[in-house]
Amino acid sequence: MARIPDSVIAEVLNRADIADVVGSYVSLKSKGGSLWACCPFHGEKTPSFSVNPKMGIFHCFGCNKGGNAIGFIMEYERLSYPEAIRFLADKYGVEIPDSRFDNEDDKLRKAKERVYGILKEACKYFYYSLYDEDKGREAMEYATSRGLDSNTLKHFGIGFAPDEWDGLYNTVRALGYTDEEMMQSGLFTRTKNGNVVDLFRKRLMFPIFDVRDNIIAFGGRAIEKDEDRKYINSPDSLVYNKKKHLYALNWAKKEKSGQIIIVEGYMDAIAMHRAGFRNTVASLGTAFTDDQLKLCARYTNNGEVVFFFDADRAGQMAAIRAIPMMCDFLRKNDKSHIRIKIAKVPDGKDPDEFIKANGAEAFAQVVKNALYVEDYLLDRAYNDNLDRSSGLDSGKYQEDVCLYGSWLTDEIARSKMANAAANKLGASADAVLKQMDALSSRKASYEDLENARRADRAKQADIESRNREIVQTEESITDQVSETVVSDLATNDEIMLFAYAMSLQERLTDPAVLNKTDILRPSDFSGDTMKTIVKRFLELYNEESGVPFALMMDTFREVTINGTPSEVVLAKACGKAMDSGNTLSRRDMYLGHLYRIRIKAIEDRERLLIDRYSLATGDDKDRIRQELQKIAEYKDQLMKAGNSL
């Protein structure tokens, strides 16, 4: 399997400063030589997530996740290893010389490339069909009626799927794509008799882009009022997961305004962009998700997110369903300081209608008037339970306002809400707040317990999996595998020897610092784990720069040392080694550990030979005597060298 060269990975890690990478997602605070935050990968209130800029790594002492900058991006962005490398390479200007070097399964990568090709050709087909005088006349009339001029159509790549079963199919097939590849694109479906046909017919087509401007899916809008389904969207596919993308984010992210506006439909998003609100995105026909909020946090730099829900009953119910998810997201990711607001368009209009009727300046005021979540919920609790003739139903109002308040993670916002509700209930603010807190703590306690259990199980599973090596047996006629237990034992001398070797970096092979015979080797170590680590270290070693700790993280994450994840053990040891004085001081500490290890190995060998010598005869006895003599001389050299330190 082809892979990205180690030299390129090393360059990516060299340029992608871990504090800069992690700091673009979480708020880091300095403490004791490291940077700390609440973990972005599990819910917690006390920071246990640490970043060590010197070694280029992160580690969470709560959920045990750790790694280098590449590992962080893999975990946070949900990318594969090569995708994460490319992500950082693009950001920090590292050129990856050949796309063939990809650690991802070649078959999967090629399949994705073929799907991207189909989606690109489909976009061309839809676009040209819209401008076809025969096929696209009705669609163009509809687009014009909705205010979509030629510049808008071109900018957003909007097209038209003709009323044909095989128009796109024949076009793509002629380009050499197979039925199987077409089915993987999400643009086709099968009839009952198994024929592949176009999924979209007689619909205005909106291409959906990822943040790298790749076309990944389409949304199709009916152009006839009596159509049963107004919108049909691409299903999840080989390159598309609707829960992890937002329509128009590829343009909105470029605004860097510190704010993202979220609307419910493509047309609303396009109208907002045309009116100058180019920081607008749209959800993709699904309930809003944690992954989408993470995108918002990332591209606003933890700024402001303004939600527009349709003004009808369905839209307002969608808001009530979405808000608990948003609050849970903020509780689980309290490193994310995004401010969430809910906006409401006057007169029950959607953003597109309001902008056409009142203009962009009036709509800017609507955005400005958006309510923070607690204020929106207060209004909802009151208005939903207010009867014009009988007044406020205080019982239902109390139930709603206490429930809504329990969702909030900000104590000040919850207190403000309790104060406002208390006036209407004729109760003390403390009583209302106490009820909110009680409802919140029940849910939080259960979730904290579940998170703790999940973290414990993950730790145990991680350690168990690292301690086993899957070995294919020779009699694999039935493809059976056997498990071989790997020795992860290591002495303190072995751990610190490796740590000081890392700390010496390029000076490890400098003749002015160390003799060649004093360079560590796998045979200096007793356990399989340390032998594997040292072997990889020597493979990666560069005489000009040594081996960065971060570059070794992929090896560390595969094994344990004495039953503990090796990255935890070695991060502590290497940190101690790096802080222990100048090069010569570290060299002396390194040699001290090396000599003790080698003397012990010699003494073990010496005892074994002495036992054999007593039983040997003739030539065997002479060979053992000669070896014992050499061992004694080498041991004497090591002891003298050790005593001179």
Image (tube, rainbow, N blue to C red):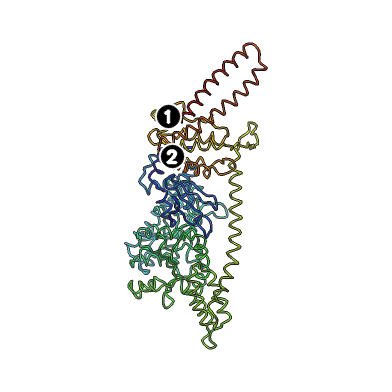
Can residue 202 be seen by looking at this rendering?
Answer: no
Considering depth in this image, is 357 or 53 the residue closer to the camera?
A: 53
x and y, in percent, of residue 189 in the image: 52, 55
Density class for disc 1 (Cα within 10 Å; few <14, some 14-19, many ≥20) is some
Question: In the rendered view, would you say 457 is above or below 270?
Answer: above
Q: Quadrant of residue 428?
A: bottom right
x and y, in percent, of residue 605 in the image: 59, 24
List the residue tagged with mark 2.
4
Which residue is at 48% across, 38% downward? 499
Looking at the image, residue 533 sits to the left or right of residue 339; the answer is right
x and y, in percent, of residue 615 in the image: 67, 17
Looking at the image, residue 473 sits to the left or right of residue 216; the answer is right
Question: In the rendered view, would you say 262 is above or below 86?
Answer: below
Density class for disc 2 (Cα within 10 Å; few <14, some 14-19, many ≥20) is many
Considering depth in this image, is 509 or 12 the residue closer to the camera?
A: 509
Q: Amino acid at mark 1?
A: Leu
List the residue tagged with mark 1.
514
